[in-house]
Image (cartoon, rainbow, N blue to C red):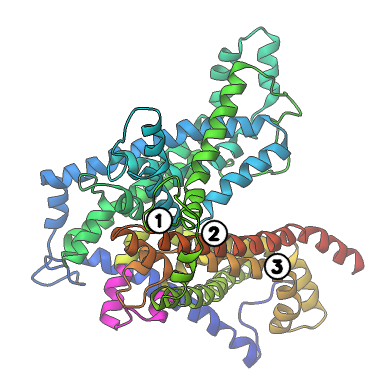
Amino acid sequence: MSTKKPILGNSLMEKLTVLPYLSGLAVILGFFFWPLVEVFLRSFSLEGNVTLSGPDFTLSHYAQVATLPYMRSLILQTAVVSLLAAVVTLGLAFPVAYLMSRVRPEVAAVIVGFIMLEFFSSIVVRLFGVSVMLGSSGPLNWALRLIGIGEQQLLYNTFATTVGMAHYLIPIAVLVLYSAMLNIDQNLMLAAKTLGASARHTFWKIYFPQIRSSVVAAASLCFILAAGFFLTPSMLGGNSDITIPLYIVQQVSLYEWGRASALGVLLLIVTVIGYYISVRLGRGSLFAFASEGVGKGTASDDPLRLTTMTVVLWVITGFVVLALLSPLVVVIASSFNGSPFLNFPPSELTFSWYKQAFGDPLWTSSIWKSVRVSLAVGVLGCALGLLLARLKSQVTNRHIADWIGVLALLPLIVPTILTAIGVFGMEARLKLLGTDIGLILPLAVMTMPYAFVIIDGAMSRGTKDIETAAWTLGASRVQAFWMVVVPRILSALVASTALCAVIAWDEITIALFQTGFEKTLPVLIYSTVYSGPTPEVSAVASVAMLAVLLALTAFMLFRRRVRMSPRRVLQTNEEL
């Protein structure tokens, strides 16, 4: 007798369970796939209309991208900046990851904690901190003046853009390389040393070939992510550092939809190819943290001795951690600056900027909008992830299940700027711009992959066996789901909701196109920085950072409970 129930049950109640699936798929199709289809259709329209036929059908926008000198220069500028960011990122991330793979796990966990603390803080707050660091009155120029070099132009140029991109990419590259280095076969290293190979020869002939594919994968990942950045070059770059995402936004603001859409489609193609290369080359190592059987590169097998190279590794690691956390520290410190200008060091300390910011209706209304939008996105994003994870667990065909997983992860692959302009064009016709629902629905789809990964992992840990036992004892599909499945994945559901809410709280690219008067907090911070950063902005940014850290703390606590679920499954099986 089969233990697999059909997706649709026999009773009316069980047949109605298909409605949530249809509703979820409608949201995904309407606020992710259809906007991308519109962008594709606009790229073939002379006037940038949503059509694939008629008198204005043309390939001229793609021809212009290939032939116009300015377009070639734009593509070259984007490639150069992205390549610089990838090179700088790998140059700093590799020594950190190598050191982490050679020290005790407890020490590596501390380094990871510092790195992830920066990574999960608000992106607009981080970039604001970097702009303060590099500004004429910032700590770096203060130090340069102190040592006699004099003030330098560190902001609004390629240098600042590269620094900002590397600041975001370093944690990603460190984790990718670290997971690969944990899988190094230490026996090969030991054999080479036993046969008399020098440390340098052993590294290049034995160690590096084992992680070469992961290094290339990390480089590809960093390059394509940098190529799709909009916020970083917008806040830190100069007029000569226009990249493809910035140009797309400029063209959309001028209603030049055709050229913007053609560039967006080409950017999507490059991104998909880059992700494919990264996944293929990094298979088995991308984010494979602390899996069973790894850890051969840790100090337990080959202790890291104190040498000149070890000191260099620790210096680079300390520099990276300091560079990642300094902008956040500067933002907090500047919020207590008694001067209305962001001078460093602060002339006097005061709490007046917090009082002034939170007494301003403009800031309080933006905070309230961010709160209600992020909470709604947390619930809806978790619901979408749950629906797809549940659907994947119920289908019997492995290939269909794999495609459901691909569908759930697609919003992570598509450049956010492409999704943003697609949603903007669609919602302009539907008159949803500036409304909460017009922001909540696309953000829920964007956060859905994170919820799907967490919930799908929780469902794969023995939940199916317990549900099958409930069916055998006569429970309906609805009863088994709510009384057996949901309690076992409750921690994953709460963690998913918290993570989706945190991501929505920090999102700015899609929210930036919501042209209503009432802006979300990140968009208001972004807009205010352009008119000149002040300690008042620092005060609000500090509170936004604290909110994200509190939500992430809740997420990590529930994530720990999810990791303990296999033990609970075994205990339940023993009781049965």
What residue is at 54 percent from the left and 82 percent from the top? 20
Name the element at disc 2. helix
**CA neighbours of label 1 inside 10 A, class few (<14), some (14 to 19), many (20+):** some
Instruction: Name the residue at the top extreme.
Output: 196
Of the numbered discs in the image, which one, if any, rests on residue 339? 1
In this rendered view, identify the residue nearer to me: 259 or 408.
259
Quarter in which the C terminus is drawn: bottom right
Q: Nearer the viewer, residue 559 or 541?
A: 541
Answer with left or right where residue 308 lies relative to residue 219: right
- 500 to the left or right of 44: right
Relative height, residue 255 to residue 207 (above, below): below
Question: Mark 2 highlights which residue?
Answer: 402
In the image, residue 59 sits, relative to residue 82, either above or below, namely: below
Instruction: Point out the stretch of residues depicted in magenta.
Output: 422-440
Identify the residue at image location x=50%, y=52%. 333
Dot 2, how many residues are within 10 Å of its Cα: few (below 14), some (14-19), or many (20+)?
few
For label 3, the residue is 491
> At label 3, which amino acid type do we have?
Ser
Q: Return the residue found at the far right.
A: 575
Task: Kindly report the secondary structure that dominates the magenta region of the rendered protein.
Answer: helix
| Mark 2 residue type | Asp
Name the secondary structure under disc 1. Answer: loop
- Residue in front for this viewpoint, 177 or 165: 165
Rendered residue at 57%/34% (across/down): 318
What residue type is disc 1 on?
Answer: Ser
